[in-house]
Image: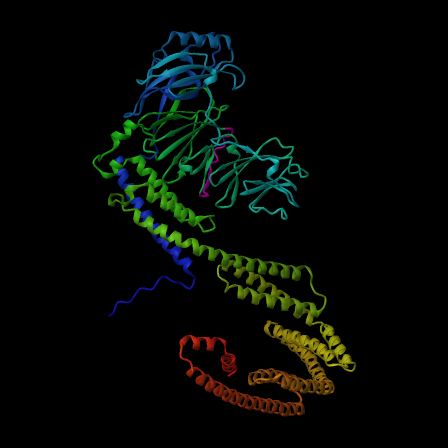
Amino acid sequence: MPEQTPKPDQLEGGAYEVIRARLDKHAATLRSGLDALNTERLDVFGGIQTALLGTERVATEHNCVARDLVAVGKHRFLFGYNIQFGLKQTTDIKDVFAAYDYNPETRGFTALPVDQVLADPRFAEDFAYLFKYYREAVFQKFMVIGPHLYLKMRSGKTIDDIKAFKWRINADGSLEYLGNRFDHEVVYPAQQEFQWQRAHRGMHRPGMHPHISIEDRVFVETVGGDLTVKIEDNTASGQGIYSEPVTESDQTLDDAEIFYAIVGSLILLKILPYRESLHRHLVFNDKTKTVHRIDAIGDSCVLLPDDHGIIFANGYLLQTGEVKTFDHGILDMRFERKVASSNGEDFLYSFYNRALGDYVLLSYNRIQQSVETPIVCSGYSLFGDGQLVLFRGDGQPQRHHALQVWQTPYLDDETSTAAATNKDSFLYKVGNPELVRGMAESRELLTLLNKDDSFAGLYLDIVKRSGDLLDAYFWLDRAECQSLAAPLREIKKAGETAIGEFEKVQKLRAVASERTTTVRAAVEKLIRETQTSPPDALHGFVHQLAGLRKLRGEIIALRDVRYTDPAAVDAFEKEVVATTDAVSNKTVDFLLGEDSLKSYAASIATQEAALSKIAKVTEADEVATALDQAATELEMLIEIVGGLKIADATQTTAIIERISALYARLNGTRGSLRNKRRELSRGEGEAQFAAQMKLLSQALANYLDLCDTPEKCDESLTRLMVQVEELEGKFAEFDEYIEQIAVRREEIYDAFEGRRTQLVEARGKRAGALFKSAERILAGIRNRVASFNEVEAIHSYFATDPMIEKVRDLIGQL
């Protein structure tokens, strides 16, 4: 069997759908390759998941309220708490701090003398002084800033009244006391890793619905009683993609305070409407055209790695549109620190509530681009082997404190290197952080490939991301790395093709959306009319039924428009069918009344009375139009009654008989009208026909005078024949006029044929005379040339003699 040449991929649905199918196919190949590469990576470097290892308890000498933990050394940590004594006059170091060694193998805790860990007489003196002269002094938290540990103490009634003891953490885990005059150094990192910019008057857009333009990408206003976010620079409309009410409805555009920050495709908004005390925080995604209200970013907001998006104390939001929030119920959180795993795959974000002393730990995975379930605790200590010790306090004093031990992927470099099993592998030579970066970017590309094409600039982003991956990572071509470059090249190629095709699809979708909107408006309007404006005459019922029938035809035609929503079309048709049935039933109920057809009978009577007054054909045509409309409506009534299931057959029969009687009367009137119109047409047509025939005669005479060549005869004959055909169509009802027109056609044809023959004969005679004249002149020229002896004389003769020009003129005429 001969091999068939494969045809290019084509579908009736269009090339765009084929390209989407190709992208899905190559995305599946890339996904399976990434999964296999990740499995091999974990085999080489080891993989650790966050998991609870167990719960142990430590005991303190007195009942106390646990406050915080901090790691000092490889497996040593400090435990801070507060004790209230009844009669004791002094507070010792051991009354506030305890030290423990942690055994990762047995997951047990061994108490250490805290005086050996915090061993410095100057610290003991400063500590005693604080508790002697500050009666409200309590321990607040540990803070590690660089190589230093700060023991943060609250010295007054508010959380901002602090004292800090500063220690240096040495390489062996020992502590060196530096003093107690470092309160100013106890600060949190920047709570927003971006700069707020205030909107100014130059960004205002006046109009009926004014707004403020944010970099011409999104538009915001707080006028008219609500806060509105728009994506179109249209001040003629107050509609937007997001709105929420404001307290003061009469405020102007200048009254609100609006700040913004741009983070990639995310636009963060901080808005304070007029006479309100709390800012509202919104995030607009320029890619998905969506808005989310996230007030937590006002307290703290940190950027995710590789410009993935933003993370805050109760959730995260990605550039690709994913957003997730956690309801842990803790507000006013401060960002404390970020911990990156040695392989660059995981990032731990710690947020802290200063009043409650609670932490929220969010672990973000760079490859999966997601956050695990938050860990809420009252203190934690993270060791180099990735083990996390934490406790959850309830604010009640107790001696025995439960400490949970978790295994996390946050290993230090030494532990991570020791966990590698195959150091001869090509993956090991590339390096875990490098592999993680490439896989994370590939996962981001897969996320884009899963997006609907409503995602702004989708295919441009796909082409750019796939191209950047191929340019940045040499190892994608290697078989040891699953040859990921092959599907990436195919994705880039298909994405480039999709860019052009998507423009066509967008135009088709715009047409489909416009048609759907038009039909939706028509459906809503007609259904509203049938529900709120019930007719009081039969004509109104018929008008509604005719509109519903026409509308259903438009809905059926809408199914053939590409990229319409089939579910929406089905819903339209269902609504129209239900409304038609309801109106039909109401029409039948109305028809059962004795005077239901009174309006049609009166209309027919009116037209019958108009018959005697008709004096012109145009007036007869107006009456005919009215009768035809009445006939159409009566036919519709018969169809409606015949199609309905009426239990009492006599009712159906009675309605149809009354309509039929009215129909017979209507047909009689139409017959009389036709006779009347024929008489008027004959009278008006006689004078009109005579005028047309006279005009035709004048036109014939005029064209015959203008015809001076056979070609003009043919052209003029064609024009007159068109006029004759128009007359035949106009007077087709009158046989006697048709005969006269046929005779006139023959006369016109004969006249032009005779004129053409005369012109052809005259042209022949003139051509013969010109030919003979030219022969005589040429004979004289021949004789004259023969008498010359020099070539120059011949040239001079041909250039100057008038007979030569005469011959040339004759040739031109011939």
Is 764 magenta? The answer is no
Q: From the viewer's perspective, tell me whether residue 416 is left or right of residue 207.
A: left
- Give the vertical position of 135 relative to 586 (above or below): above
Query: Principal SS element in the magenta part?
Result: loop
Is 330 magenta? The answer is yes
Of residues 340 and 784, the one drawn nearer to the viewer in this rendering = 784
Q: Which residues are magenta?
A: 320-332
From the image, which quarter does the N terminus lie in?
A: bottom left
Q: Which quarter of the picture shows residue 432? A: top left
Q: Is residue 417 visible?
A: yes
Q: From the viewer's perspective, tell me whether residue 535 is left or right of residue 432.
A: right
Of residues 310 and 87, the one drawn nearer to the viewer in this rendering = 310
x and y percent of residue 628 in the render? Answer: 67, 77
x and y percent of residue 118 in the render? Answer: 37, 12
Q: Which quarter of the picture shows residue 117? A: top left
Q: From the viewer's perspective, tell me whether residue 436 is left or right of residue 125.
A: left
- Give the vertical position of 699 relative to 2 (above or below): below
Q: How is the image coloured?
A: rainbow
x and y percent of residue 752 in the render? Answer: 60, 89
- Give the vertical position of 418 relative to 638 (above or below): above
Q: Is residue 61 visible?
A: no
x and y percent of residue 613 in the render? Answer: 79, 81
Q: Which quarter of the picture shows residue 611? A: bottom right
- Give the vertical position of 576 relative to 124 (above or below): below
Labels in figure, total: 0
